[in-house]
Image (cartoon, rainbow, N blue to C red):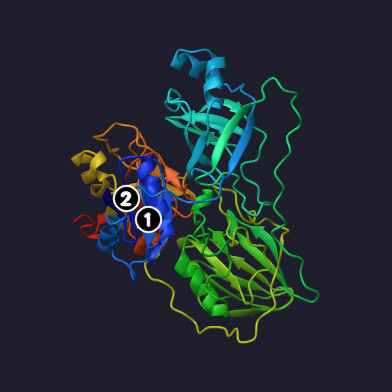
């Protein structure tokens, strides 16, 4: 067992194999360690997020080494059969790689049970271990830009089913109509860690029309009679509902997501008298307008930019950020282009009447969970104000918000896979500026430098958990800095992670800005 530093609040536990990983996971679920917040198992690793105020990394490592790695998770017997039409576009190629006929590939794939080892990549995507030992094929050298929902694929020794249409590099051998992810179910993910799975060949059977997964209920509740509604006039580049996210959903392959600037979200809610994790509107850049139908108290935090109130009679005046203000019926609020930072947070006293999904009102753009992006014409009903919801005193806006004019410095914690890179690559990470490319979004910042980083270890990295702030380096040598909507697991090595105290800052960095990384001491020695 090795405990590798990931961030100031996370470690990656590296074990010998999948059985050991699942044994440690089972042990920690049966007897939790106080202070652990999330567990993300993968092929040979367990990503553990913890509260530093309750537990140090060294103490966590010490307690982990006392665990029995022979344990297994105890759960009710559950066996799921998945009917598959084996007509995938890679079936013949897989057969050629294995030196057998396509029919033999199908026979081997359906000939034994699989176990759900872990989940990741996308909500409801399960990595299935077991099966015939010969079914061990590499991912495609060039991933496809779109694989249909229900595609059954092979990658390494794992089998899996794509829950939704998405890019991917697995070898596709068939398709199923059984929904892997359905929000109408009490547990949306069909396959859970520990479940037993059997594939059934229905290629020659009469094909019936697939039963689509049930649609999630409407995100927006109806406005109460006489209640206030905020009507969206213009959404700008992107306007989403965001709160603190969905911690604790890793078993279903769902990452936390949530506001890109958590401190700005909390401040906006404090100012209007809400609980600090209440959903706000996260506005990227500017061009956003809303009209108040009724009376409301709002506050805007985050980026620094013009804020304008326009009355129904046409009168206009600027409003301050980081303090509450009242809107009357017909008043319009406009957010202009920021001069520093890029994301603003609009809170309303009482909060929005929005239906949560898996306990959160956040829009996860990668997983496609939560309310859709706001658009012109949307009407957001406001909840009734609770007695005692007192508005807060004005707060001081944060200094030093990122701009394109100045180089932005982010503290980083080296690891967990820094040893996969050459010494020159480690020096390049912090020795040159990286420009934020237009391909950046809530999933991550795509960075470009004059000197790409080279790996010393060219092996294929088994999928392992990734954390917000991870700096992953694909074969191009140009890093990607994972942000709020990052995938739960990834297959490229992480050279370092942005320190937890700079994650909100990273969420405010504009396109074309220049970023420079600065190493910090991090967790200190995790290993004894």
Please indicate, yes or no, whether residue 367 appears anywhere in the rendered image: yes
> Percent position (x, y) of residue 272?
57, 79
> Percent position (x, y) of residue 305?
50, 66
- Give the residue pinned by disc 2: 13
The quarter of the picture where the C terminus appears is bottom left
As helix, strand or loop, the secondary structure at mark 2 comes to strand
Taking the spot 64% from the left edge, 80% from the top edge, the residue there is 326
Choose between 382 and 396: the one closer to the eye: 382
> Percent position (x, y) of residue 284?
54, 58
- Give the residue pinned by disc 1: 48
Q: Looking at the image, how many numbered discs can be counted on the residues?
A: 2
Choose between 446 and 107: the one closer to the eye: 107
Return the mark for residue 468.
none
Q: In this view, does 296 lie to the left or right of 169?
A: right
User: Relative to 119, does residue 527 appear above or below in the rendering?
Assistant: below
Choose between 56 and 15: the one closer to the eye: 15
Task: Sort mark 2 into few (<14), some (14-19) or many (20+) by Cα contacts within 10 Å.
Answer: many
Earlier residue among tags 2 and 1: 2
As helix, strand or loop, the secondary structure at mark 1 comes to strand
State which quadrant residue 106 falls in: top right
Q: How far apart are marks 2 and 1 (CA)?
A: 8 Å
Taking the spot 51% from the left edge, 48% from the top edge, the residue there is 253
> Percent position (x, y) of residue 59?
26, 63
User: Relative to 423, does residue 184 appear above or below in the rendering?
Assistant: below
User: Which residue is outermost to the right?
Assistant: 225
State which quadrant residue 477 falls in: top left
User: Relative to 173, does residue 501 appear above or below in the rendering?
Assistant: below
């Amino acid at each position: 067992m090795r405990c590798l530093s990931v961030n100031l609040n996370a470690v990656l536990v590296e074990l010998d194999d999948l059985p050991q990983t699942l044994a440690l996971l089972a042990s920690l679920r049966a007897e939790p360690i106080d202070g652990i917040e999330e567990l993300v198992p993968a092929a040979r690793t367990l990503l553990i997020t913890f509260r530093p105020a309750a537990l140090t990394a060294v103490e966590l490592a010490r307690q982990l080494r006392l665990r029995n790695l022979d344990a297994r998770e105890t759960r009710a017997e559950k066996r799921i059969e998945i009917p598959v039409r084996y007509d995938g576009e890679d079936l013949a190629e897989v057969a050629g790689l294995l030196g057998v006929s396509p029919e033999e590939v199908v026979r081997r794939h359906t000939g034994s049970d699989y176990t759900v080892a872990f989940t990741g990549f996308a909500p409801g995507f399960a990595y299935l271990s077991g099966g015939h030992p010969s079914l061990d094929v590499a991912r495609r050298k060039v991933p496809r830009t779109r694989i249909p929902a229900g595609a059954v694929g092979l990658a390494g020794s794992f089998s899996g089913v794509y829950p939704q249409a998405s890019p991917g590099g697995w070898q596709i051998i068939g398709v199923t109509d059984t929904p892997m992810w359905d929000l109408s179910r009490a547990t949306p993910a069909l396959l859970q860690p520990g479940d037993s799975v059997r594939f059934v060949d229905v290629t020659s059977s009469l094909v019936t029309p697939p039963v689509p997964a049930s649609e999630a209920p409407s995100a927006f509740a109806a406005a109460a009679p006489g209640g206030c509604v905020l009507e969206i006039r213009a959404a700008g580049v992107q306007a989403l509902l965001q709160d603190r996210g969905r911690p604790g959903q890793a078993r279903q392959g769902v990452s936390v997501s949530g506001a890109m600037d958590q401190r700005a979200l909390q401040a906006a809610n404090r100012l209007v008298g809400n609980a600090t994790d209440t959903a706000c509107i996260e506005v990227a850049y500017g061009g956003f307008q809303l009209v108040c139908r009724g009376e409301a108290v709002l506050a805007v935090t985050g980026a620094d930019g013009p804020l304008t109130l326009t009355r129904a009679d046409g009168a206009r005046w600027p409003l301050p950020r980081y303090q509450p203000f009242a809107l009357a019926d017909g008043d319009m609020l406009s957010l202009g282009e920021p001069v520093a930072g890029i994301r603003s947070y609009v809170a309303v006293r009482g909060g929005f009447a929005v239906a949560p999904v898996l306990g959160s009102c956040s829009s996860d753009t990668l997983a496609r969970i939560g309310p859709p992006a706001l658009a012109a014409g949307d009407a957001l009903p406001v909840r009734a104000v609770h007695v005692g919801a007192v508005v807060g005193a004005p707060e001081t806006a944060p200094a030093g918000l990122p701009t394109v004019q100045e180089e932005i410095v982010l503290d980083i914690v080296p690891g967990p896979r820094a040893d996969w890179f050459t010494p020159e690559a480690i020096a390049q990470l912090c020795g040159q500026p990286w420009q934020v490319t237009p391909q950046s979004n809530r999933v991550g910042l795509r960075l470009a430098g004059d000197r790409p980083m080279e790996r010393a270890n060219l092996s294929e990295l088994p999928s392992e958990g990734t954390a917000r702030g991870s700096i992953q380096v694909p074969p191009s040598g140009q890093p990607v800095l994972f942000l709020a909507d990052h995938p739960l697991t990834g297959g490229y090595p992480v050279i370092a992670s942005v320190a937890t105290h700079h994650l909100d800052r990273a969420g405010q960095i504009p396109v074309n800005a220049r970023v420079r990384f600065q190493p910090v001491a991090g967790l200190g020695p995790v290993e004894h």
